[in-house]
Image: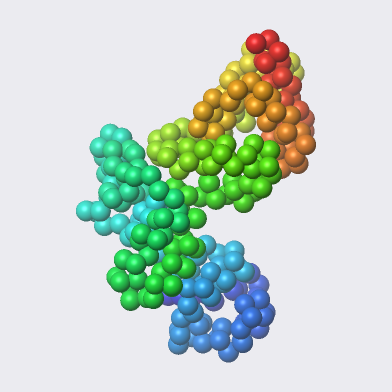
Amino acid sequence: MAFAEKLIAVRRANNLTQEQLAAKLYVTRQAVSRWERGEVTPGIDMMKLIAAVTGEPLSHLLEMPEHYCQSCGMILTPDDCGTDAAGATTDHYCKWCYDRGKYTYETTMEAMIEDCAPRLAQNTGMSLDEAVSLMGAVLPQLERWRTVQENEERYGAEARARYGDEAIDAASEALLDMDPETWNDMKELERAILGQLSIAMGDGDPKSSEARKLVAMHRRWIGLNWGHEPQDEAYLGLANGYLADQRFVDYYDKPCGTGATAFLVQAIESSLTRA
């Protein structure tokens, strides 16, 4: 689907007229009309604004191909694909970023942009500024960078205030260095924890064997996120913080029922008391 058709569909899905969309984008209705007729295509920065206003992923607006590297954003051809831990080809990463189930080099998102933007500009004919702007919008949505970005946006300031920059940066680096197999294990464990929480709550005893299993699973999950097994004091502090933050209460209570967060905290406290 061409951008013009995509924009029309996105605008209508948001129940916006051309005038209303133009007002949100601080452009004229005529500009929106020209985009939708395919006469011109907005620049990268305007694309980013359209994505922000409509909630449509920038990759969809840009009509990015189905397979592109989830580290650097490079379009993948069969010869460019990396390999998983078993040596099988994966269509998630390019061979320059990923080999045998591991990232080939440590980097930051900023360094990745600085390294790749000049080549993107050269290969596409866009300016360097446009290439930097495009990569700055696309990379945070890719698998390698997404979770770190989301965590920083949601909890960054308060987490840094509570635990310090060094601890948070180390946790972020652990996530960035995590291979997809471990990542998938972590996400499966996250889902399993919610199921186990419901089971343990059914017993009604935060000291039961099911509750102890819940705590073991949860502590392992926190360790994967932090990059190391949490010490008792830090783990207890984290648990107590859950009850003071409605976001955490919602995370556990909504799928598992009212009181789920409080039960989890009680189970953690009980396990540490026994220890």
The quadrant in which residue 222 appears is top right
Q: Is residue 5 above or below residue 145?
A: below
Task: Measuring from the top left, give residue 138's x and y in whole percent.
Answer: 46, 61
- Front-lying residue, 80 or 225: 225
- Front-lying residue, 191 or 202: 191
On-image quarter of the C terminus: top right
- Front-lying residue, 152 or 64: 152
Q: Is residue 232 above or below residue 18?
A: above
- Front-lying residue, 207 or 234: 234
202 left or right of 90? right
On-image quarter of the N terminus: bottom left
Q: Is residue 84 above or below residue 213?
A: below
Task: Measuring from the top left, give residue 144's x and y in whole percent.
Answer: 44, 47
Task: Measuring from the top left, give residue 191's x and y in whole percent.
Answer: 56, 33
Total label count? 0
Residue lying at the far bottom of the rendered structure: 30
Residue lying at the far top of the rendered structure: 274
**Residue at image location 36% in from the left, 49% down from the top:** 92
